[in-house]
Image: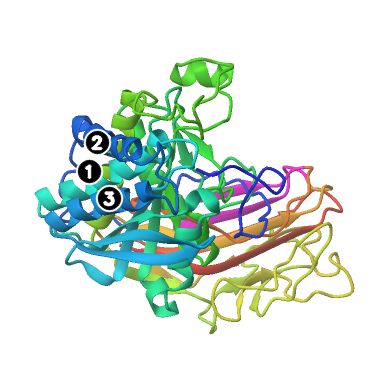
Amino acid sequence: MPLTWRNGRRSPIVAAIATLSLSLTTAVLTAAPARAAAPPDISLANVKAHLTQLQSIANANGGTRAHGRPGYLASANYVKGRLDAAGFTTTLQTFTYNGATGYNVIADWPGGNPDDILMVGAHLDSVAAGPGINDNGSGSAAILESALEVSRQALQPAKHLRFAWWGAEELGLRGSQFYVNNLPAAERARIKGYLNFDMVGSPNPGYFVYDGDNSDGTGSGPGPAGSAALEQTIIDYFTSIGVPTRGTDFDGRSDYGPFIAVGIPAGGTFTGAEGVKTSAQATLWGGTAGQAFDPCYHRACDTTANINDTALDRNADAIAHAVWTIATAVPPVVVWQDTFETATGWTANPSSTDAATLGQWERGDPEATTSSGAKQLGTTVSGANDLVTGRLAGSSAGAYDIDGGVTSIQSPPITLPSTGPLNLSLSWYLAHGSNSSSADYFRVRIVSGTTTTTVFNQTGAATNRNGTWATATAGLNAFAGQTIHILIDAADASGASLVEAGVDDVKITQ
């Protein structure tokens, strides 16, 4: 993982996205697999054997495996040789940076849907100052062993599997940026998810998972749609072994950056770098409070002695869990969806309690408004239209925002299959000014007969929240075999508060 810059960050990628907090637990990236193989227990001894090889390469090449140095090419050739022998189709992709040739190792496992690719990546280079065994031999070795286990088990995934080891990450994500920049648009569209593993064996470890849904409400905001599900898949593994996790922000410091910049969902794990472990974190995970997660970060002492075996073992198994769970899952069947490009029978304000006098829900091409930042978004997730609370901008942000109470909009009837799993997903935003409160809200409910059930709720707060698209998901198994309506509410119930909301791409899958 590289050093930070530009106000503590070094991202060439994502524009700042305002914070949102989801109260809904996200679902797995795809429906439950119909033919999934059990994820393996990755051998810690095998992972450490790869680290020993990387250490030996560094020792033989001036103590480093940095970009442009012989130790890096030797590292790339070691990884490629193991993958070639295991039956992968491998490419040593070259690029130039700072007058030196860089290398990405790209490895494709035969089979799987070529239009549905899961990528797994880690940077292979070190800084010039040391051998880089935790940063990032640990991630490189862990995904290498997972790839080799794919071969040993002759895995036949539903998705196409592609592994990558990036060069020159320490100099600004150069290898991964080169790869993404040189992918034709059609090839980018085939990559449905990218998992990144950078520093997964820190000696004073934390257990961090990239915060795909921005549930932590800090920093750069959520990842592209699908990132929340990648996050949840990894959290599920750590939950299963009784290890608590915490979110880590998409701050642009590792190779997920170029992927999320072009809208590819991303996720992964991280055990900490130069940051200092707090007392609360030491209570949560053990280790030493007041000490860096990795005291040898970017130093010559980042050797094989700079690894926590327990953290490395757990993270290697988490990688395998994510790969097997996601890649072997059968893609879900779309039961019902609406992108709002045509009228499909949604009913605005179906209830007598819908008292909003302005900013009522409607389908249309929204106009952007700003007030201390973006409020109503003029962009949709897909196409030209969405559901929006008063699509016009007017003379000011408050001209067509929600005023006077609740406005709702209800879908046409939807008959669900009698078997699941059934999942609802939608893109949404809630924006408000600092004059808001928890009385304001955005809410999604399911109406079945005389019963109405809330499946998602986001309340306002007395802070400024700018509009940005996020993804919500909810399980609908309880409604299997029933005919339902989706009911979406938004409320300005705090007096004269500025409130806007939008919805796009509503989908139910089986």
Q: Which mark is residue 47?
A: 2
Highlighted magenta segment, given as a residue range:
437-461
Give the SS element for disc 3.
helix
Indicate which label's residue lies in the foreground, 3 or 2.
2
Residue 408 x, y percent position in the rendering: 64, 63
Identity of the amino acid at label 1? Glu
- The majority secondary structure of the magenta stretch comes to strand
Q: Does the magenta run of residues contain 192?
A: no
Could you tell me if residue 410 is visible in this image? no
Number of callouts in the render?
Answer: 3
Q: Quadrant of the C terminus?
A: bottom left
Q: Which of 221 and 43 is in front in this view?
A: 43
Sequence-earlier tag: 3 or 2: 2
Give the residue at x 77% y 76%. 392
Identity of the amino acid at label 3? Val
Sequence-earlier tag: 2 or 1: 2
Q: Nearer the viewer, residue 241 or 139?
A: 139
Q: Is residue 27 above or below residue 216?
A: below
Colour scheme: rainbow
Could you tell whether 63 is left or right of 152 in the image?
Answer: right
Give the SS element for disc 1.
helix
Residue 459 x, y percent position in the rendering: 66, 46
Q: Residue 323 carries which label?
A: 3
Give the residue at x 55% y 80%. 383
Could you tell whether 119 is left or right of 369 in the image?
Answer: left
Q: Name the residue under label 1.
A: 145
Q: Residue furthest right?
A: 395
Sequence-earlier tag: 1 or 3: 1
Could you tell whether 150 is left or right of 309 in the image?
Answer: left
